[in-house]
Image (spheres, rainbow, N blue to C red):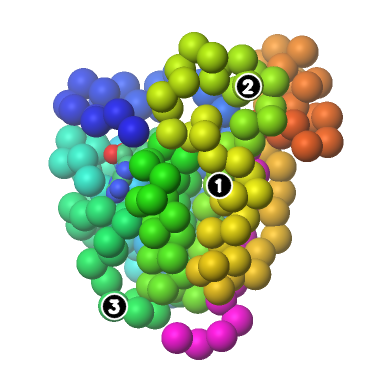
Amino acid sequence: MKEYDEGLARDYGSRWTIEEEVREAAAGALSDAPGRILDAGCGNGLLLVRLPPDAFVVGLERSPWMIDEARRRAPRSRFVIGDLARLPFRTNAFTVAAAVNVLWGMKESDARRGVGELARVAGRAVLDYRNRANPGILLRRGRDARNPFHKISVDRFRGWLRAAGLTWTERPIRRPWSRGFLGALLSRVPGWAPHLLAEGRRPLPL
Ligand SMILES: C[S@@+](CC[C@H](N)C(=O)[O-])C[C@H]1O[C@@H](n2cnc3c(N)ncnc32)[C@H](O)[C@@H]1O
């Protein structure tokens, strides 16, 4: 995943991408979240500001530039610089842990480990994965073959959820019609949604 410096941190999210739809869906899934919420890979705070105002919220980020922006945007949240693949929190420290628009950009071994970490620190996890079967993403694979998310199939992501002890529900994230007819139509073909948002629960206590 690219390194976010000062300029990128300020600009991130200013142009619409499908990531905005993912964020919005994740905010909906978290709208009833009580207690302590971890937003792992919180970026410049675009999800943090949509979380319930009465929750105790922690944003974890590896980029200090992103944290600076997030703190400006969501001053009531707490922040930690750290690595999603090695979360510096105790088991069950949170009620819910989110990783939104993050895992698919990480090195595969770290992303897999990160899913386990989310499940460890909270009994509930909200996360998304990219669907490389989507034609738009498929076309980009040729241009950008080294990007890690192009190598990971949805089934492999699902295997990581299973290995982390999570059971989950999944919902497709589609392009809105306002962003182009063809892309929106293709994203509605079964199996072709560009992202999937999973809400997982860990039934067994750790
Ligand atoms: C595409 S941005 C998404 C930000 C935010 N979740 C959102 O949807 O607005 C991905 C963020 O994850 C952070 N990130 C990537 N790998 C990370 C890791 N291993 N640990 C913590 N943060 C990470 C990046 O620095 C970046 O800010």
At label 3, which amino acid type do we have? Arg
At label 1, which amino acid type do we have? Asp
Query: What is the span of residues highlighted in magenta in the rendered image?
Result: 195-206
Residue under circle 2? 138
Residue in the foreground of this view, choosing between 32 and 122: 122
For marks 3 and 2 on the same chain, the one whose residue lies earlier in the sequence: 3
Quadrant occupied by the C terminus: bottom left
For marks 3 and 1 on the same chain, the one whose residue lies earlier in the sequence: 3
Residue found at x 62% / y 55%? 158
Closer mark to the observer between disc 3 and disc 2 = 2
Residue under circle 1? 128
Is residue 72 visible in the rendered image? The answer is no
Give the spatial CA distance, label 1 vs label 2.
18 Å
Q: Position of residue 178 (x, y in %)?
A: 70, 17
Question: Which residue occupies the extreme right position in the image?
Answer: 190
At label 2, which amino acid type do we have? Leu
Residue found at x 57% / y 28%? 18
Q: Dot 3: what SS?
A: loop
Is residue 139 visible in the rendered image? The answer is yes
Q: Dot 1: what SS?
A: strand
Residue under circle 3? 90
- Say few, some or many: other residues with alpha carbon within 10 Å of mark 3 (under 14 / 14 to 19 / 20 or more): few
Q: Dot 2: what SS?
A: helix
Q: Quadrant of residue 86?
A: bottom left
Task: Note whether 128 is above or below 173 in the view shown.
Answer: below
